[in-house]
Structures are given as structure tokens and as C-alpha cells.
Amino acid sequence: MRNFRHRLAAVISPDIAYAAMALGQFNVNPTRAHLLAAKGVLRYLLGTLDYALKYNFSQQPVGPPASVLLPSNCAFTDADWVSDETDCWSISGYAFFMFLSLVAWSAIKQCITALSSTEAEYMALSHALKEALWLRLLLLILKMPLPRPFPLLCDNQSTLNIANSLSITSHSKHIDIRYYFIHEHLLSGSFATTWVPTTDMTADIFTKPLSPSLHAKHIPLLGLVHLP
């Protein structure tokens, strides 16, 4: 049973989502450098076989307390601007929590070039909102309680200003119209945006390689705990 739990913990590993996304770009034509990086990920998994996601039905926080009071149901959304120097595309990441437990996460490269960190964060918010709409539909089908408005947490004030404003400025008029569906859902009251400090941005682990200390800080915030 213990070996089965270890194998399961290795498969369900949100802490390597960024690494898996970054390496997955080179599946067709990998180099020795990519092989060495992949071996590094395998060594990390070997050292964290006892990690597993904890779903706490008592709705008590799993990780360390944040510096701000966070809702039990919410989504963290973040972006790293121009992460890839080869194509200058940014990385979007999100983490969805239901009843204080991680239920969905993503690390994905954006498909167009963002001209600023605000624009990259805005596109990341759009990416997260699409997942939020799917989760809302799933909860409706299952007849489960649906938080309204569902909080979308972001650490970029300018992004939140654009998302909650109907006016188009010189800083936002060039953004593709497909990202503006955010306004419709915010105005309907189904979702609401909230600012959180960067220190509490759990989705940061999905957007870039972090230092060992910062990576270790986000592990418990994701709800990853050591198996007994």
C-alpha cells in the first residue's frame, strides 16, 4: 500500500508543473541539456516520493497561514512576463482551491507576445477564468454549493484595474478582444477580482523556476504534505 501511495504521489505533483511544461516543448527534438534537466526533475521526484496532496474536509488550512485572510474557495492567477528569451512569450499559471484544497492547476506558455507585465497578467487572468467557468458548470451539475462571486486573486493592481473597468485606454486598446470576456463575467457578479501581495501568490510556482527556499515555501501552500 505504501508503494502504491508513493507512485500516486509522483503522478499528482503540481510542484513540477512548470518543469513539465518547459521540458514538454522539446519532446520532438530534445538535446543533451534537456535530458540533464529531465534527470534533475526525476531526482527531485525521487526525493519527494512521500509528498501527497491533502484534502482536508474539516476545511482547516493545510499550509502555513498567509499574511492576508484568504477565502476557502478561490483561484490564484499569475504570469511571468517574457519568460522565454527565444520567443519572448510569457507563462500563465493558476491554482484553484475548493474548501481550502487544491483541485486544479496549470502552467502554460501564452501564444502571443505581451508588451508589458500587466498585459501578461491580464491574459493569465483570462486563462484562469475559462477554468473557473468549467468548474462552476461542474459544481452546478453535481448540485454542490457554488460560491458567488468566486474570487480570482491577482498580485498586479494594474491588471485588476483593466479587468474591472469598461473604459479602453492607451495601455489596453491593443489587447485582443477575445480577452475582454472577463468584463462580462465580473459585471454579472459570478466572479470578483481581489489583490493579494506577491508573497502570498501561490501560483508563482507555476510560472517560473524558483529558488530552493521559495519553492519550498510554496509546497505547503499548495497543500502538499509528507505521507506518514
Image (spheres, rainbow, N blue to C red):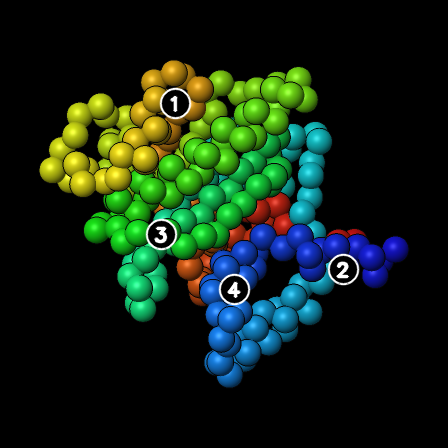
Residue type at the position of mark 1:
His
Q: Residue placed at 30% from the left, 31% from the top?
A: 180
Please name the residue that numbered disc 3 is placed on. 111
Number of residues whose C-alpha sits closer than 10 Å to that of mark 4, classed few (under 14), some (14–19) or many (20 or more): few
- Residue projecting furthest to the right: 1
Q: Residue placed at 49% from the left, 28% from the top?
A: 133
Please name the residue that numbered disc 4 is placed on. 24
**In the depicted structure, whether residue 61 falls above or below residue 78:** above
Please name the residue that numbered disc 1 is placed on. 185
Q: Position of residue 92 (x, y in %)?
A: 40, 49
Q: Residue placed at 44% from the left, 19% from the top?
A: 190
In this rendering, the label closer to the viewer, 4 or 2: 4
Residue type at the position of mark 3:
Cys
Query: Which circle's residue, 3 or 2, is located before the other in the chain?
Result: 2
Please name the residue that numbered disc 2 is placed on. 7
Residue type at the position of mark 4:
Gly
Query: Which circle's residue, 4 or 2, is located before the other in the chain?
Result: 2
Number of residues whose C-alpha sits closer than 10 Å to that of mark 2, classed few (under 14), some (14–19) or many (20 or more): few
Q: Position of residue 163 (x, y in %)?
A: 29, 30
- Residue projecting furthest to the left: 170
